Image (cartoon, grey):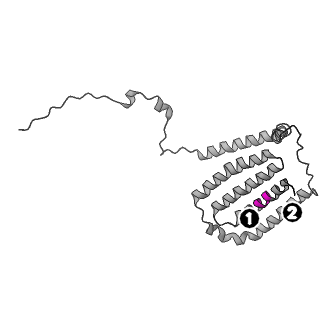
Amino acid sequence: MTFVQFLFYFFAAIQILAALRVITVRNPVHAALFLVLTFVSAACLWILMEAEFLGLLLVLVYVGAVMVLFLFVVMMLDVNIAEIREGFASYAPAALVVAVIMVIEMGMVLTHRIFNVRPPLEKASDVSNTEAIGRVMYTDYVYPFEIAAVVLLVAIIAAIALTLRRRPETKYQTPIEQIRVRRNDRVRLVKMKAEKKESGS
């Protein structure tokens, strides 16, 4: 067994055990941390297969952004796991059927019996994995890439438009008016006659 094969089996075993702990652990924070370990192990497997771009993308996007946000949401909402697990047994048969169908579909894809799967991208000796993916993305798949960017932009604008509400009872600050303020608008000098203190009798 070579050192690369040892690393593959090592990271694969960690990934399987971490994935099992995600669905078996009781604490949601611990489940999120085990999911982070699963993603990191998957990224190590990608790097072993010389797909360093996908491995780094998995760490930066999922571990660095999605899972941190998920941890914040779980810790802020204080989810009651006992109530969630009450109806777990009723959904188990449907979940088992879906799992079996997914395993069959993945087996069909991996064995090339039904789907016509093209071989993976062949990387030239003088080109890195990131450069090879960039060439394919911005030449053969440039239009789907641009369409996906426009869809994401529309989703961002829609989310901002749905959450941005002006309520009449809420007071808002206008920085432009605050900058343009003058002394006469804020301070008023009033001239008053001096009052004489009356002496006691």
Q: Which residue is mark 1?
A: 20
Crowd around label 1: few <14 · some 14–19 · many ≥20 (10 Å): some
Instruction: Pick whichever, 184 or 45, lies toward us.
Output: 45
Q: Check disc 2 and report the residue beneath it.
A: 104
Quarter of the N terminus within the rendering? bottom right
Query: Compared to 170, does 78 lie above or below?
Result: below
Dot 2 or dot 1: first in sequence order is 1
State the residue lying farthest toward the left: 201
Q: CA distance from mark 2 to mark 1?
A: 20 Å
Q: Left or right: 36 with respect to 80? A: right
Percent coordinates x, y for residue 189 in the rendering: 31, 28
- Viewer-closest of 84 and 56: 56
Q: Position of residue 76 (x, y in %)?
A: 57, 56
Q: What residue is shown at x 80% (from left), y 41% (from top)?
A: 130
Q: Are marks 2 and 1 in contact (CB under 8 Å)?
A: no
How many marks the image carries: the answer is 2
| Quadrant (top left, top right, bottom left, bottom right) of the C terminus | top left
Give the amino acid type for the residue marked by disc 1 in the picture: Leu
Residue farthest toward the front in the current orientation of the protein: 2
Q: Magenta stretch: give its range.
A: 10-15
